[in-house]
């Protein structure tokens, strides 16, 4: 592992710990290091307390090790967004900051009113962590931030020493799939039929239904290797991992929920999809069909209309292109419309997340009726799947993705999730095949790169 500036970190901490603030945050610039190597370096000392995030263009990457502070909410209403925001402001206001300052990373449950599956028990309605060690990589620059809350310098020296003198753990044994199970497949098909009946009877306009795939492995799944596979196989995606206790929520999402930098914010409408072609000609034909297909265009319009209305509530200068374009991923292509705006004074990124989640691409339309329908007929607990996941810094800037193309990993098992939008003339078989396409990114990463 690359040698870090160990003595410089300790010297700065020794000086600033005398400040006696609730939190001390120190940042130093350091030499280049692969963020995934840093994530792997924390395996022994910080297993269950790591996170990884890289943005859509892999220009900005964060790796967090350890928990300096945890913000958690079990509030099952929209108050959870405000609770997290309020506590984060209190932490920042009471901190001594030298350098870039602290950052917190985490996410929200899709619908905390529907929580039943044991495998999501470690993921509350909302949870964010301020890491003890934060690696930040922005293009060619790398920083290390150490966040301290009532921690002794001796203990910090021990932890830093472990990171700076990491050793090769030895040979890694590939974990191969020994069992694959489609969870509640027939129940999901019936739910699609039921949803189309509701829509045809004008009870609702659109609802998104997700299903689950369960995998069991021969050995413990190495999370660093899964992240590396996702980074290599899924360019133009948000790559994320959030460990909590014995499990890790991990994925490669193509969908931005919102990004805020000062008053400038942006979001994206992503709805309507079809597989990639086997040849260039077939791929172009499929793309043209998607751009012209009435069902997919209506599904996309639901998302654009809702997001534009939500942004107009709290923003000015909202810019929405009149026509979607194609966003092409490795296995699938989507209809895509970017949206840009400026927030009004006092509008936080949490206010934006609260208004945008869930978009019609993940919930349906109208929003409240769609979420209620999902709660009643969808045969799974989404947990954090299809919900906001991302980061916020000390200045209130941040970015959230929608946690799709994702899985919840245990030691030797994984729960994968994929969904699709149901409208009046949806065909259950076609929707089922669409979810199979959406499972592919995680399956490919977990199954060792075999298509």
Image (cartoon, rainbow, N blue to C red):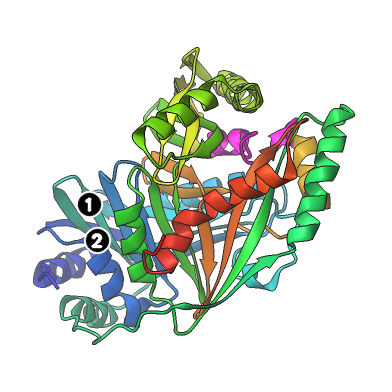
Label 2 belongs to which residue?
35
Question: Percent from the top left, x then y, of residue 24?
Answer: 31, 61
Q: Residues within 10 Å of mark 2 (few under 14, many from 20)?
A: many
Q: Residue at the spot x=18%, y=70% of the render?
A: 14
Q: Nearer the viewer, residue 262 or 189?
A: 189
Q: Classify residue 173 by image quadrant.
A: bottom left
Quarter that holds the C terminus: bottom left
Tags 1 and 2 touching, CB below 8 Å: yes
Q: Nearer the viewer, residue 70 or 182?
A: 182
Residue 86: within the magenta? no
Q: On the rendered structure, is 275 left or right of 296?
A: left
Relative to 60, is 156 above or below? below
Q: Residue at the spot x=30%, y=41% of the render?
A: 57
Label placed on residue 137: 1
Q: On the rendered structure, is 286 left or right of 124?
A: left
Q: Residue at the spot x=36%, y=40% of the render?
A: 395
Which segment is the magenta one? Answer: 350-367
Question: Percent from the top left, x then y, of residue 394?
Answer: 37, 46
């Amino acid at each position: 592992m690359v040698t870090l500036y160990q003595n410089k970190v300790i010297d700065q901490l020794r000086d600033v710990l005398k400040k006696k603030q609730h939190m001390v945050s120190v940042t130093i610039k350091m030499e280049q290091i692969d963020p995934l190597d840093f994530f792997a370096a924390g395996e022994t000392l910080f297993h269950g307390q790591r996170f990884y995030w890289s943005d859509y263009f892999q220009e900005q990457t964060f790796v967090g090790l350890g928990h300096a502070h945890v913000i958690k909410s079990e509030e099952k209403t929209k108050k959870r967004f405000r609770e997290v925001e309020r506590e984060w402001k209190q932490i920042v206001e009471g901190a001594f900051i030298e350098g870039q300052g602290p950052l917190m990373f985490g996410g929200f449950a899709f619908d905390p009113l529907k929580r039943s599956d044991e495998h999501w028990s470690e993921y509350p309605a909302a949870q964010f962590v301020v890491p003890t060690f934060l690696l930040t990589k922005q293009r060619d620059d790398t920083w290390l931030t150490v966040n301290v809350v009532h921690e002794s310098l001796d203990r910090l020296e021990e932890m830093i020493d472990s990171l700076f003198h990491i050793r090769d753990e030895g040979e890694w044994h590939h974990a191969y799939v020994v069992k694959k199970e489609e969870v509640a497949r027939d129940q999901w098909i019936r739910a699609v039929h039921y949803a189309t009946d509701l829509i045809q009877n004008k009870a609702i306009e659109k609802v998104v239904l997700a299903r689950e795939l369960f995998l069991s492995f021969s050995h413990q799944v190495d999370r660093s290797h899964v992240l590396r596979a996702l980074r290599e196989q899924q360019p133009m995606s948000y790559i994320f991992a959030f460990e909590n206790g014995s499990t890790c929520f991990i994925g490669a999402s193509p969908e931005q929920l919102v990004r805020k930098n000062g008053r400038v914010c942006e979001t994206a409408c992503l709805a309507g999809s079809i597989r990639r072609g086997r040849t260039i000609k077939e791929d172009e034909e499929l793309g043209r069909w998607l751009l012209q297909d009435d069902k997919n265009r209506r599904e996309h319009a639901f998302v654009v209309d809702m997001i534009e209305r939500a942004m107009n509530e709290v923003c000015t200068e909202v810019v929405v292109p009149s026509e979607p374009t194609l966003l092409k991923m490795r296995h699938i292509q989507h209809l895509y419309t970017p949206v840009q705006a400026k927030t009004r004074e006092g509008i936080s990124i949490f206010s934006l997340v609260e208004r945008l989640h869930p978009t019609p691409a993940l919930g349906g339309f109208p929003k409240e009726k769609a979420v209620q329908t999902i709660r009643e007929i969808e045969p799974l607990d989404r947990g954090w799947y299809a919900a906001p996941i991302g980061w916020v810094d000390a200045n209130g800037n941040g970015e959230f993705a929608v946690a799709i193309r994702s899985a919840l990993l245990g030691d030797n098992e994984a729960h994968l999730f994929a969904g699709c939008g149901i409208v009046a003339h949806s065909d259950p078989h076609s929707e089922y095949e669409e979810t199979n396409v959406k499972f592919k990114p995680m399956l490919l990463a977990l199954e060792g790169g075999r298509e």
